Image (cartoon, rainbow, N blue to C red):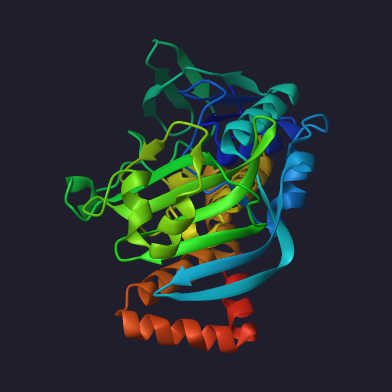
Amino acid sequence: MYDVAVIGAGPAGTSAAITAAGYGASVLLLEKGKFPRQRVCGEFVSAESLALLTSLLSATSGLLERAPRLHCARVFVDGSMLEMPLEAPAASIPRIELDAALWNSAKAGGVDGREGHSVLTVEGPAPFAIRTADQNHFLARSLIDASGRWSNLNSRPNENTAGSAGKWIGVKAHFRESAPASSVDLYFFAGGYCGVQPVACGGETRINVCAMIRSAVGKSLQETFPQHPALYKRSQGWHIATEMAATSPLIFYQPEPFTNGVLRAGDAAGFVDPFIGDGISLALRGGVMAAQSLRSFFHGRSSLQQAGEMYEATYRRDLMHVFQTSSMIRRLLGLPAPIRTGIVRLLAGFPALTGYMVRHTR
């Protein structure tokens, strides 16, 4: 009988597992894949979460020391460019290395980590009975679902799942570029956007190119690049360094951090617009927050329901503003082109307003 089982070993799951183990809890961490593994991700880690990431990683990983620092964000939309200095530099860390480093830190911290264990069913609550595809059975007093935005554990109905032309798709690959800028560049176009930033991976500096596009627009990066003239021109000098990865559907819904006795973290709780660049930070913070909320439960000072309600209240107080601001920006970007252009010019003329919006996505 474990004190807590965590399903999914992305940043949310591993941060929860590491934190819970630090409280003396017996922790089971189940991951359906095997490391190292690739993920469709912008690979942007905001400055606000770097200290937290440092506390979670093993001191020997060297991951943060190798990571390029990003000093500004540049937004390209409707022929205009808006440059937004980052008050504190962000880091660019490849998910294939970040996930593996967090997994190793969890194992080193006493977490019982099991790769290649796909969860089929969960029965509960209190205790939770977990059955995996290889017919293993586990019991846990509490459960943190960090299995991602779309799994058999937390699937939610949405019009985007119907295979329509409006479905959002995520695509990503690493490329080689001569002298990449130390910025995160976002190219917006009708039907999606594409983000570009330098990243250190495989002993060299590459660029991570990650796009979110409507299926009617395209299903690959090669179909994405021509959607924006400046992006297409820039892409002509790129050389592919990795295979393209894809994921779908990308679904937006109101966050649900606590349901039926299960604490949810990361994309399992709520999927934030990728262009905000705070997905990894939300995952890390949400995972730690879930484990912190369970601490009193581990030591018999509260019920699971009370711990879950505490987590939901803290989540909504500290993280919900990110979802609200990102939703507002998404609506602004969906306005007709002349209005969008006016908004970009307004923001360019009032740096304080731009800074306010950036702070409210953190």
Q: Residue at x 73, y 51 (%)?
A: 50
Q: Tell me the quadrant of the picture where the N terminus can be found.
A: top right
Q: Residue at x 54, y 29 (%)?
A: 5
Q: Left of 167 or right of it: where is 44? A: right
Is 318 placed above or below 197 here?
Answer: below
Is 102 placed above or below 249 here?
Answer: above
Of 79 and 2, the residue lying toward us: 79
Q: Quadrant of residue 86?
A: bottom right
- Evaluate whether residue 122 shows in this view: yes
- Rendering coords of residue 299 (x, y %): 70, 36
Is 82 placed above or below 208 here?
Answer: below
Is 123 placed above or below 353 here?
Answer: above
Of 63 and 265, the residue lying toward us: 63
Of 194 and 26, the residue lying toward us: 194
- Rendering coords of residue 115 (x, y %): 53, 18
* Residue farthest along the top direction in this orientation: 135
- Rendering coords of residue 226 (x, y %): 34, 56
Q: Quadrant of residue 55?
A: top right
Q: Tell me the quadrant of the picture where the C terminus can be found.
A: bottom right
Q: Total marks drawn?
A: 0
* Residue farthest along the right direction in this orientation: 59
- Rendering coords of residue 99 (x, y %): 60, 33
- Evaluate whether residue 299 shows in this view: no
